[in-house]
Image (cartoon, helix red, strand yellow):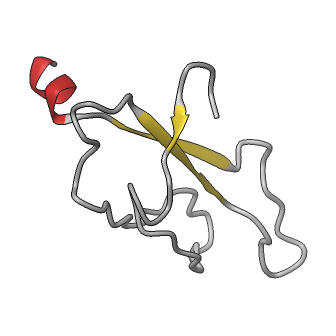
């Protein structure tokens, strides 16, 4: 995780999943839905973070860039209301 951030816990903050995402020719973006448990971080918790990693591209000649990870930050309602 990034400095100063706590790890979001599967089963506590979000529902863990493994899924296949298919990209069409010349497509370089895709959306996935992540189920949040309780919808938010409790107000007494620090922000938490989890990562989404893209791996094992198919067919074998497909290559991934070094930027195959996306970090997602969950903030408390209290912080969101102040923004």
Q: Nearer the viewer, residue 6 or 27?
A: 6
Q: Quadrant of the C terminus?
A: top left
Q: Position of residue 16 (x, y in %)?
A: 50, 69
Q: Please give left or right for residue 36 compared with residue 81 in the image.
A: right
Q: Residue at x 75, y 65 (%)?
A: 55
**Residue extending furthest left?**
81
**How many numbered discs sit on the rendered protein?**
0
Q: Residue at x 48, y 63 (%)?
A: 30
Examine the image and state in which quarter residue 33 appears.
bottom left
Compared with 69, 5 (above or below) is above
Q: Position of residue 64 (x, y in %)?
A: 79, 56
Q: Nearer the viewer, residue 12 or 52?
A: 12
Compared with 24, 35 (above or below) is above
Q: Position of residue 39 (x, y in %)?
A: 22, 55
Q: Residue at x 80, y 71 (%)?
A: 56
Q: Residue at x 56, y 79 (%)?
A: 19
Q: Nearer the viewer, residue 18 or 42?
A: 42
Q: Please give left or right for residue 29 compared with residue 47 in the image.
A: right
Examine the image and state in which quarter residue 81 appears.
top left
**Residue extending furthest front?**
44
Q: Quadrant of the N terminus?
A: top right
**Residue extending furthest right?**
61
Q: Please give left or right for residue 62 compared with residue 1 in the image.
A: right
Q: Position of residue 77 (x, y in %)?
A: 16, 35
């Amino acid at each position: 995780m990034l400095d100063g951030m706590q790890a979001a816990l599967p089963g506590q903050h979000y529902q863990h999943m493994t899924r296949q995402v298919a990209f069409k020719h010349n497509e370089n973006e895709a959306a996935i839905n992540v189920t949040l448990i309780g919808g938010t971080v409790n107000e007494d918790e620090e922000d938490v973070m989890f990562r989404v990693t893209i791996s094992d591209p198919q067919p074998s000649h497909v290559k991934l860039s070094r930027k195959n990870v996306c970090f997602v930050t969950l903030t408390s309602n209290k912080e969101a209301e102040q923004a």
